[in-house]
Image: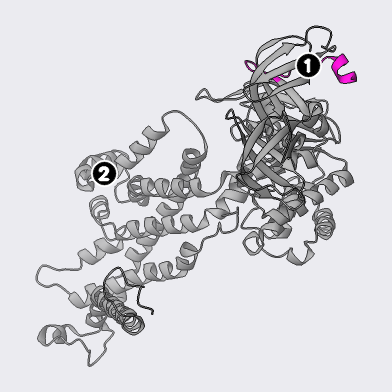
């Protein structure tokens, strides 16, 4: 097992498209690092750079202590699971599983025992003599996994391995993958565009946008302290609400240390901030931190547009009087109907503030947090 | 059914006529297919029948249903005429050309399909342009070229021109089919530890077998049937191929139709057999299930 590190990596395609810019990140030994981002964020390219399927334009890639920047994929000793599985269609499951070993000139007896062991652990024994065309999607997925595991590589790379599975199988396989990671204790890099997959699987998550690393942190850190507006909006479901406004530092005796006043069209709130005034900002609030109540004096009001019952909660879309739209999560027992006029309460502890220009987070001062 | 529902296309009543309409269409289609088959197969049928009829009967009162089958023409082919030599020549020339075409064509197609390099479109265009030369226009320069190389009346003297003319088709068809094989498969093989050459031989080539078979057959048929070069670049019966030999059957005073048609049947049989054997291979989609489709 080994760590994988990218150091100041650039990847610029001949047509000028920049897939990675000054990218430095590291998957520690035994860690499951998730690369997440919208399509076109360069996450798959980063994975292909690690695999050696693409060459870096600049920078260094290390696997373990070895500089592999100029090594072809076959000399990097890593395994990759492709989005579409990429099983060899002319070979049986047995041959697919054993391909990596036989190409490395392992003895047939060794190959046979290792393939048998992997097939047993993945429940593929009955399918060993079938061809990929005769397998279901989930079975193909398991063969692709087995083909990666059987070689006992230094690290595993996963390129959206669950995106071709149906919803139920996806959740099952996700759990299976997490279990596999614990069992093998292997370094894994996992690419996905699905933030819930990222949050549930990753030891750490790297958020990419247009080839630039936005933040790399644990799931909870990403969720609670997003480094910028992009990360805040990408991580979490339903997505975070953003309300434009200004921040004014609290003055006078009533003003507490580190507290400010946020002024938007509809909302005026006391919020924890760095204690300074800011011209234009975005106030970010997760739907879970917005309370919707039928009555409420002196609170901003809005009209309910759509209510989505989810069973354990309901998602409420509210349009405020000034035109701002908010998404809130309400408990299931609350009776809220489209067309209702409701009051909004924003829980101050759930507030994030982002600079409107740069999008970067305005960190509340320690005094405000202590409160 | 109920009144308010009306058919927008007009007052066409419901079930019964529609099913019988479908049946009529099936019948019509069947009849058309039979007619087409009779039309295309008749020349072959007539060639076989005529080759089994004596010359005298053939000219006196030709019959679609032969009364007496005689094998004189076939016997004459292999006793009086030595038809074995042209068949051997054709097999050697067409077989060698096909093999070389497939080897060179596959390598070229791999490069064109998988490797990025400058001037690729130009090369593809140039390869295609070769096929547009009318053969007749280059027979004489080619003859001079082959003569100065001392290749007139030799196997290489036919194989090399054939390769030039058959190669574009091979390269184009194979490039197209290699492009359709998902690149992920070779990349997976790379990551699994295969070199570029190994991923070519162990992954790509087996998957390209159906199109290799197709192009192989087409190349073979082209060489088997080619007449102009074979006539121009051979001198005597020693190196003549089947089409040339058949054309030279006709004497000054008579055309031995029976023998010509018998020779045609003999010449067609191996090609037809080969196509039938490989047909399954050609039709079969080997890439099914490679990736989620």
Q: Does residue A371 lie above or below B260 as drawn?
A: above
Residue at 88% across, 41% down:
A185
Tell me, yes or no, if residue B193 can be seen here: no
- Which sits in the foreground, A27 or A273? A273
Would you say the magenta stretch is mainly helix, strand or loop? loop
Quadrant of res A354: top right
Residue at 27% across, 80% down:
B31
Tell me, yes or no, if residue A189 can be seen here: yes
Element marked by disc 2: loop
User: Does A307 sit left or right of A288 as displayed?
Assistant: left
Task: Please state the total of marks drawn on the protein image.
Answer: 2
- Which sits in the foreground, B30 or B106? B30
Q: Does residue A98 lie above or below A33 as drawn?
A: below
Q: Does residue A140 lie above or below B271 as drawn?
A: above
Residue at the spot of label 2: B132
Are dots 1 and 2 in contact, CB under 8 Å?
no
Task: Say which chain tag 2 marks.
Answer: B
Report how far apart the C-alphas of labels 1 and 2 lie in the structure.
76 Å
- Which sits in the foreground, B122 or A85? A85
- Numbered range of the magenta stretch: A354-371
């Amino acid at each position: 097992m080994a760590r994988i590190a990218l150091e100041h990596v650039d990847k610029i395609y001949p047509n000028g498209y920049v897939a990675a810019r000054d990218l430095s990140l590291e998957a520690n030994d035994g860690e499951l690092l998730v690369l997440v981002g919208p399509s076109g964020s360069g996450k798959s390219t980063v994975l292909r750079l690690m695999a050696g399927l693409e060459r870096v334009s600049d920078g260094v890639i290390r696997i373990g202590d070895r500089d592999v920047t100029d090594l072809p994929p076959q000399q990097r000793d890593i395994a990759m699971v492709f989005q579409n599985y990429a099983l060899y269609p002319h070979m049986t499951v047995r041959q697919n599983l054993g391909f990596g070993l036989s190409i490395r000139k392992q003895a047939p007896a060794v190959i046979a025992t290792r393939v048998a062991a992997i097939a047993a652990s993945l429940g593929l024994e009955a399918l060993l003599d079938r061809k990929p065309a005769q397998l279901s999607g989930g079975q193909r997925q398991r063969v692709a996994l087995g083909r990666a595991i059987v070689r006992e590589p230094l690290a595993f790379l996963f390129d959206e391995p669950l995106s071709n599975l149906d919803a139920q199988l996806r959740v099952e396989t996700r759990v299976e993958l997490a279990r596999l990671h614990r069992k093998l204790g292997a370094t894994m890099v996992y690419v996905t565009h699905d933030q819930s997959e990222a949050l549930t699987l990753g030891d750490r998550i790297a958020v990419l946008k247009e080839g630039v690393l936005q933040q790399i942190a644990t799931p909870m850190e990403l969720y609670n302290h997003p480094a910028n507006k992009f990360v805040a909006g990408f991580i979490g479901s339903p997505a975070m609400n953003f309300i434009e406004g200004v921040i004014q530092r609290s003055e006078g005796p009533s003003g507490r240390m580190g507290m400010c006043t946020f002024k938007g069209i509809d909302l005026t709130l006391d919020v924890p901030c760095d204690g300074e005034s800011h011209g234009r900002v975005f106030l970010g609030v997760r739907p879970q931190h917005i309370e919707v109540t039928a009555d409420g004096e002196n609170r901003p009001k809005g009209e309910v547009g759509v209510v989505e019952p989810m069973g354990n909660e309901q998602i409420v879309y509210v349009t405020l009087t000034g035109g701002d739209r908010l998404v809130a999560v309400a408990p299931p027992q609350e009776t809220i109907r489209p067309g209702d006029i409701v009051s909004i309460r924003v829980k101050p502890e759930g507030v994030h503030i982002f600079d409107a220009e740069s999008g970067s987070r305005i960190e509340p001062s320690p005094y405000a947090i202590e409160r | 059914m109920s009144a308010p529902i009306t058919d927008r296309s007009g007052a066409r009543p419901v079930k019964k006529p529609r099913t019988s309409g479908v049946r009529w269409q099936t019948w019509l289609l069947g009849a058309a297919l039979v007619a087409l088959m009779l039309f295309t197969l008749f020349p072959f049928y007539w060639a076989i029948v005529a080759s089994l009829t004596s010359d005298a009967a053939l000219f006196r009162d030709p019959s679609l249903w032969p009364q007496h089958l005689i094998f004189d023409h076939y016997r004459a082919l292999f006793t009086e005429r030595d038809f074995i030599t042209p068949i051997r020549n054709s097999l050697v020339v067409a077989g060698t050309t096909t093999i070389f075409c497939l080897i060179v064509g596959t390598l070229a197609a791999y490069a064109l399909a998988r490797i990025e390099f400058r001037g690729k479109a130009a090369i593809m265009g140039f390869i295609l342009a070769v096929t547009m030369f009318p053969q007749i226009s280059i027979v004489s320069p080619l003859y001079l070229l082959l003569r100065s190389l001392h290749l007139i009346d030799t196997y290489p003297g036919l194989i090399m021109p054939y390769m030039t003319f058959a190669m574009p088709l091979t390269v184009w068809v194979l490039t197209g089919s290699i492009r359709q094989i998902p690149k992920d498969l070779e990349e997976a093989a790379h990551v699994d530890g295969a070199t570029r050459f190994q991923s070519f031989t162990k992954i790509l080539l087996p998957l390209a077998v159906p199109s290799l078979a197709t192009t192989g057959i087409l190349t073979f048929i082209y060489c088997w049937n080619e007449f102009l070069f074979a006539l121009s670049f051979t001198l005597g019966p020693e190196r003549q191929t089947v089409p040339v030999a058949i054309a030279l059957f006709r004497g000054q005073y008579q055309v031995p139709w029976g023998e010509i048609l018998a020779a045609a049947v003999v010449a067609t049989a191996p090609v037809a057999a080969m196509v039938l054997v490989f047909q399954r291979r050609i039709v079969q989609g080997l890439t099914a299930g490679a990736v989620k489709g």
